[in-house]
Image (tube, rainbow, N blue to C red):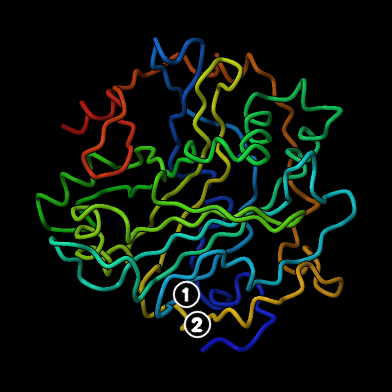
Amino acid sequence: LLPMPPRRPGDTTVNASVLGSKEEVDNGHVFRLRVGPNYKKNKKKAESLHAPLYDVLCCDMFHTKKMVENIGRFIQLPSLPDDHQEVNGVPPYFIVNIMFPLEKPSMFGSKKDGKTMSLVLYLLLTRDSHKHLKTSAIKDAHPAHRLLQRFVTSGELYDRFKLLAGVKDPATVTSSTMLQSLLRSYNFKPLLSRPQHTWHKQQGVYIECDVNVFDFNYLTRSSWFSLRETFGKVEVGGGITIEGHSDDELPELLLCKLIVRNFRLENCVDADFTDGEDNVEHMVADYTIKDLYPQFDKEHVTEFEHDVFEDALEEVVVDTDNFDILGVDVEHDEHQHQHQH
């Protein structure tokens, strides 16, 4: 079992190669995100070539006897300088906890809890994002910054949280023709986490999204169970965004982009989280962000220009509507779908 608190982010993966390097991520999959004008009518997407709004600091991989929601209450996050605290209602940290069931699913009824394998991502607002979220700057900021601020502070837009994940070649994941076809159909497609998510906040410190795969439908859970060992042997590219609707919320930008490898049970650390352990002091002074993320003050700052985002590429593809084969909302890119089939 993990040692008693304080538990610090990344403790479980400090000796494992789990997250891809910045260079690998920058040269990895290029995600297609919504652009305007009038997305509802035109259904256009373009490649997102610009820096995400958050840095991915590290991740943890836990094995628990049951799901642990609001896992941030057990984690001691690094302290931040005075000029990188909560800004305009947006906490500096964003935690994403994806909880996978480890027991074989049943077609007739499903367990709502049980042995769990959790991938926990720790994100931090970039210096650039923090600057644009300030009250004095947000009016002229990129639409994605304004959408993020509304998303976090209103609590009414959580159902727009979208996950994107995929592999370079589904044929390397499984020899099953059926599962290969399923992977190709949903490879790198945006998936709305609703309604299988819960949200938590630690005022001024973090916001957390817990994604509960236990609540996904049978086909999704069965596919995960069949592929869980294989996924640990391949690189999985991932991204997160907030769904934009109107022109003043577009184009979409990524919240984060990452590569995950070696996500398998034997690399997870057994953790016995109990309600009696959630009294950790967040952001203590003797443990700073530079201890965890030395490049904190060295990142490249990108100024956003709206016309650059909208006209960055000549090739713009058209989406089909969202539909729900797997019991989750998935956007399909018509161009990619036709190419793959």
Q: Residue furthest right?
A: 82
Please state the horizontal and vertical placement of residue 175, each as a whole percent of the image: 12, 58
Q: Identify the image quadrant of the C terminus.
A: top left
Disc ID at residue 271:
2
Q: Secondary structure at mark 2?
A: loop
Label 1, on which residue?
62
- Inspect the image, locate mark 2, and give the three-letter code of the amino acid beneath it: Ala
Q: Secondary structure at mark 1?
A: strand
Which residue does the image show at 10% across and 56% down from the upper left?
Answer: 176
Please state the horizontal and vertical placement of residue 180, each as a whole percent of the image: 17, 49
Asked whether disc 2 touches disc 1, contact meaning CB atoms under 8 Å apart, the reply is: yes
- Inspect the image, locate mark 1, and give the three-letter code of the amino acid beneath it: Phe
Which residue does the image show at 69% across and 20% down from the upper left?
Answer: 305
Seen in the image, is 212 located left or right of residue 144?
Answer: left
Disc ID at residue 14:
none
Q: Is residue 82 above or below residue 291?
A: above
Q: For residue 182, what is the image quadrant?
A: top left
Which residue does the image show at 68% across and 39% down from the upper left?
Answer: 153
Q: Is residue 156 above or below residue 259?
A: above
Q: Is residue 164 above or below residue 73?
A: above
Q: How many marks?
A: 2
Seen in the image, is 280 located left or right of residue 250?
Answer: right
**Callout 2 environment at 10 Å: few (<14), some (14 to 19), or many (20+)?**
some
Mark before the other along the chain sequence, 2 or 1: 1
The one of 269 and 211 positioned closer to us in this rendering = 211
Seen in the image, is 184 located left or right of residue 243?
Answer: left
Q: Is residue 181 above or below residue 251?
A: below
Please state the horizontal and vertical placement of residue 195, each as a whole percent of the image: 39, 46
